Amino acid sequence: MGVSVGKLSLLSTTTKNLAVLAQANNKCRKHVCTTSFHFHHRRRIPWSLLCGFMLFGLGLVSLFTGHMASDLEWYSHRFVRRTLYSTLDGNYPAPIDVWKSQYSQYYYGCSERGRRYAPAVSERMSNGYLLIGTSGGLNQQRTGLFSENMTITDAVVVARILNATLVVPELDHHSFWKDDSDFIHIFDVDWFISYLAKDVTIVKRVPDNFMRSMEKPPYTMRVPRKSEPDYYLDQVLPILLRRQVVQLTKFDYRLANNLDDELQKLRCRVNFHALRFTKPIQELGQRIVVRMQKMAHRFIAVHLRFEPDMLAFSGCYFGGGEKERHELGQIRKRWTTLPDLSPDGERKRGKCPLTPHEVGLMLQALGFSNDTYLYVASGEIYRGDETMQPLRDLFPNIYTKEMLADEELKPYLPFSSRLAAIDYVVCDESDVFVTNNNGNMAKILAGRRRYMGHKRTIKPNAKKLSTLFSARNQMDWDTFAKKVKACQRGFMGEPDEMRPGRGEFHEFPSSCVCKRPYVDEELRKERFRPPKLVAINLTKADSLSNGIRRIGRT
């Protein structure tokens, strides 16, 4: 505000100068004041010159007051922002609630169709049938299901762009995990078709009579990664119109991240509403949630991603010596196309998952007490109990789906995708979700939790935390905790972390999250507080005398 004070003083000086000029002018008009110049002759001050000075002064007044108004507006915005969002570094008075954002109530998912949104074209009137082949690429790892989830979401949007009839996608059966689960084993197909009926016409298969009438087999093609809608209209649509059936292969990440709002909202309707798990998967996941909630009022779900294959794929080193290097090196040979990576370089870039011990230290530093209940969503942990013990020492109440539903899980054990779906249900229902990687399951869950009201989602800032963990023994606990909180600023799932254009849309669905007007609850309570009633105790004699007086007056 120092700038504004300086402007006020300058404004005051300018006003005084104007007053002096006006006073001098009055004297000149009364006494025909003259002045002496270097040419030794006397002239009157021109009235036009004086008016010019006055207009110049008024302009200065207008200029400075305008700047002061803009400064006041800027400062007021900063003040509102500081009171609306709490940070973790302690500079602002309101501490953050690690369990729930106090501003989540002002945000809600909004993916409704617009007024001018055209209805879906019928199967008969569509431009042809679109088949999608999901990918079993290296990026899937154990959560290949969620790569396919993204693929299916974008397939619906592409079908909408092309005015095509979408055939229910087939999941990949040739990936490293050899999981032969199909769409109908994981998702509720009938719900999927009916929920999107106003967006895209979807069928379970191309009609047999149509296939028999085709002179050539379906045309197969692969589009470039992150292609714009115009590419599909220019390159794919002409082929679809000519051949009537087109199959797009390796369809992961084949649609651009940034689309118009209507198509982004369609993505949200697919991802957060239409793709619903089958009833057996959903019910088993909910039973596990209920069992966790019976033990604790609230719980954290941690997606550790500390399986041997995940660690080998990352190219990172986790302190296990030559034995670890040999074991993970042998696993890494399964993928012949992986490049040679520097473990230290990957860690500095924030590409390495935290160890279970580091996850526990982060949670404890953020303020979670050691009696907090943790649900660990993971497959086989590398080195099992040896790796998990440091986390158990910090948080003894740790549970997994195997511990909570051992017998009920047996039918699902051969199918990694179905096991991942069960973990997804529990993580989605948790009070706090902690992700330990930037994989597809983490992105989709983070986006869904934002869409469903900004439920607390913590993503480790691995790039900064790795440096902090390496210097852990050089500082006391309070200093360490303060630095962890500072590192995690912007990674706690607060509403103000989501901005249009930031990251992948599946993780930051900004077009599908709307904001309610902010209401200061304390001010509202003060404004609508009922007036205090003052009790007056009257004796019988007082009441009688008052009544007599009123009668006498009438």
Image (cartoon, rainbow, N blue to C red):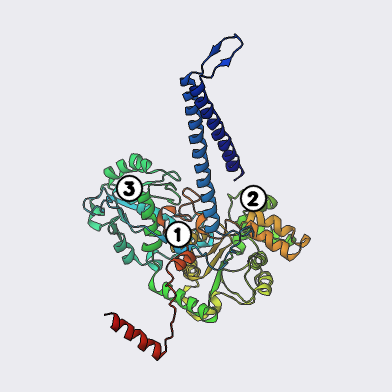
Q: Earlier in the sequence, mark 3 or mark 2?
A: 3
Q: Residues within 10 Å of mark 3 (few under 14, many from 20)?
A: some
Residue 132 appears in the figure: no
Asked which secondary structure carries label 1, the reply is: loop
Residue 197 or residue 100, whichever sits in front: 100
| Alpha carbons under labels 3 and 2: distance apart | 38 Å
CB contact under 8 Å: marks 1 and 2? no
CB contact under 8 Å: marks 3 and 2? no
CB contact under 8 Å: marks 3 and 1? no
Residue 279 falls left or right of residue 307: left
Residue type at the position of mark 3: Ile
Residue extending farthest bottom = 540
Asked which secondary structure carries label 3, the reply is: helix
Q: Which mark is residue 518?
A: 1
Residue 253 falls left or right of residue 37: left
Residue type at the position of mark 2: Arg
Q: Is label 1 or label 2 in front?
A: 1
Identify the residue at horizontal 56%, vertical 33% (top origin). Answer: 14
Q: Which mark is residue 349?
A: 2
Residue 215 or residue 48, whichever sits in front: 48
